[in-house]
Image: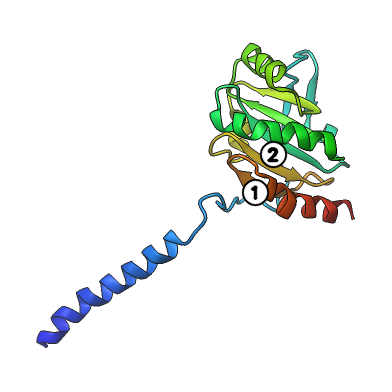
Amino acid sequence: MKHLRYLVPLGLLLVLLYFLRAGLSLNPREVPSPLIGKPAPAFSLPRLDQPAVRIAKDDLRGKVWILNVWASWCLACRQEHPLLVAYAKSSQVPIYGLNYKDEPAAGLKWLADFGNPYTASLADRDGRVGIDFGVYGVPETFVIDGEGVIRYKHIGPLTPEVLRDTIDPLLKQLHG
C-alpha cells in the first residue's frame, strides 16, 4: 500500500511528460485547418487599386489560384514579398492578395515600393473575410482549386522550400 502512494503520482508524471514530448515535436507552422478540403468561404471584396470593382469567390471558379493574406504593417510579409514577386513571374497560377486590416493608401504604397505580385489585391479592411478563412495572423497563404475548395494552408512567410516541395507539386496535381 505504501508503494501505491508513490506509483500514482509517478504514473501521472510519466503521462504528462509523454504529452509534453509529443507537443514539443510538432511544427508550429503546421496548424491544421478545419477548412482544408472544404469550400473556401464566400466573399465579395473591392479591389485595392480599383475600389469600384469587386471580386467574388464565384468569379474565380474554374481556375486554380493562390490567396496570399498580407498587410503593409506586417514585417514577415516584407520578408516573403520578394519571393512572391519572383514566383508570380515564373508561375502560371494567379495569385490574389487579401490586404488584411490595412489602410488602402498604405497597401497601395507598399505595392508600389516593393512590387506587385498579385493578379488583384482585395481590400479586407475589417478583417471579416480573413476571419472566415481562419487567418491567425499575416502572412498566410492558401491554395484553392478550380471548384473553390481549399487544398492547402501555409502559416507564416513562404520559403523557396515550401514553394518547391509543397505548393508546386500540389499545383501540378490540381492542374492534372
- Residue 108 lies left or right of residue 78; in this view the side is right
Image x and y of residue 117, in percent: 76, 29
- Residue 75 lies left or right of residue 55; in this view the side is left
Q: CA distance from mark 2 to mark 1?
A: 9 Å
Mark 2 is on which residue type? Pro
Kindly identify which residue carries mark 1.
35
Classify 10 Å Cα crowding around label 2: few (below 14), some (14-19), many (20 and above): some
Kindly identify which residue carries mark 2.
41
| Circle 1 SS class | loop
Image x and y of residue 162, in percent: 68, 49
Q: Residue at x 80, y 47 (%)?
A: 145
Q: In which quarter of the view is residue 125 placed?
A: top right
Q: In which quarter of the view is residue 56 placed?
A: top right
Give above or below for 166 relative to 133.
below
| Circle 2 SS class | loop
Image x and y of residue 96, in percent: 76, 32
Classify 10 Å Cα crowding around label 1: few (below 14), some (14-19), many (20 and above): some
The one nearer the camera, 120 or 53, is 120
| Disc with the residue nearer the chain's start (2 vs 1) | 1
Mark 1 is on which residue type? Leu
Q: Residue furthest bottom?
A: 1
- Residue 38 lies left or right of residue 156; in this view the side is right
Q: In which quarter of the view is residue 83 placed?
A: top right
The one nearer the camera, 41 or 74, is 74
Instruction: Determine if residue 28 is in view.
Output: yes
- Residue 125 lies left or right of residue 164; in this view the side is left
Q: Dots 2 and 1: beta carbons under 8 Å?
A: yes
Instruction: Determine if residue 42 is in view.
Output: no
Q: Residue at x 80, y 34 (%)?
A: 88
